[in-house]
Structures are given as structure tokens and as C-alpha cells.
Amino acid sequence: MSVFFRRKRKKNNMSMSMDKYLAIKRDKKKNKYNVAPKADRTWEGRTYASKAEMEFHITQSHDPAVKYIELQVRVQLGEDFKCIMDYLITLHNDERYYVDVKGVETPRFKDVKRLWKKYGPAPLHVVKKSGKRFKTTEIIQGQH
């Protein structure tokens, strides 16, 4: 004689409206590059692409050697490739160089580096945040 046991199904007491579910899901959604919230990367009314980019601008604006800082500079590399560098920094001796603050190096940036060597109008400093400081990890000389 075989005996079958039936399991009692537990009722799901966790009924939730679809609006509440979507609100929770929206709050948990993160950027794939872990970008800080907008309020954390806003300075003097300008929202930066990353917190590191904002902090770099703050440190450079207090540097006495820096004469002028241009933000989000468009650069033409070759005939059909454009990119936007984070900064173009001009020193008091009129030396100029571009800066790109990197958290994560994307495949597109590898193309930019390759093309920069061939078409770059000035040196490109690749900067990464290390603790509370910024380190220039690479300087790519352009054809200037």
C-alpha cells in the first residue's frame, strides 16, 4: 500500500501592487559603471559625468599653474572619428594638453588612444583616481 502525502501550498501573503514593485525595481537599478547619484557629482551648478571628473576639476581649478580649463572639448581624430575629451588645460606658459578622467576603460577608448597617436592635436593625459589623489597613468603624444 502506498501512501501519498500532499504538501500544503503556502499562500503568498506578500501581495504588492505593480506600481510599488516597479518603484522598488527602479530604486535598485544601477548604472553599469557605478556612477554616483547626480547630487554627488554636481559642483557650481554643473553636473559631471562622474564624481572623479568633478573632483579633478575642483583640484585643477585650485592649481596655480593652470591658466584656463575648457570642459567637454570635441576633437576630430581623422576624417570620420570624433571624440569628446573631459578637459583641455592651458598652463600659464601657454602649454596645452587634453585630459580624460577614467574610471573604467571602454573598448571605444582603446580606439581613441590608437587614433590619438596618429591625429591628436596635443598630448592626452589619461588620469585615474587613486585614493584621494589623481594619477596620470598614461600620456599619449599626438601629432602636434
Image (tube, helix red, strand yellow):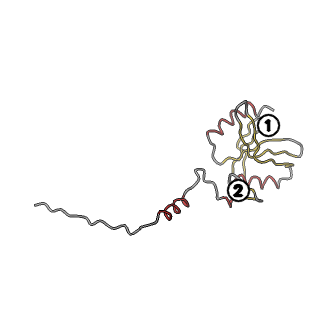
Find the distance from the CA under tag 1 to the CA under tag 2: 27 Å
Residue at 62% across / 42% down in the picture?
106
The three-letter code of the residue at mark 2 reads Lys
- Residue beneath disc 2: 132
Q: Which mark is residue 39?
A: none
Comes first in the chain, label 1 or label 2: 1
Q: Position of residue 118 (x, y in %)?
A: 73, 30
Disc nearest the viewer among 1 and 2: 1
Looking at the image, do the residues carrying marks 1 and 2 touch, with CB atoms under 8 Å apart? no
Quadrant in which the N terminus is drawn: bottom left
Q: Position of residue 125 (x, y in %)?
A: 74, 42
Q: Relative to residue 117, is residue 87 depicted above or below? A: below
Residue positioned most to the right:
93
Front residue of 135/121: it is: 121
Number of marks: 2
Asked if residue 101 lies left or right of residue 91, the reply is left
The image quarter in which residue 42 lies: bottom right
Mark 1 is surrounded, within 10 Å at the Cα level, by few (under 14), some (14 to 19) or many (20 or more) other residues, namely some
Quadrant in which the C terminus is drawn: top right
Q: Position of residue 120 (x, y in %)?
A: 76, 34
The image quarter in which residue 6 lies: bottom left
Asked if residue 31 lies left or right of residue 128, the reply is left
Give the SS element for disc 1.
loop
Residue positioned most to the left:
1
The three-letter code of the residue at mark 1 reads Ala
Residue at 74% across / 52% down in the picture?
56
Residue positioned most to the bottom:
13
Residue at 53% across / 62% down in the picture?
23
- Residue beneath disc 1: 122
Mark 2 is surrounded, within 10 Å at the Cα level, by few (under 14), some (14 to 19) or many (20 or more) other residues, namely few
Q: Relative to residue 70, is residue 75 depicted above or below? A: above
Give the SS element for disc 2.
loop
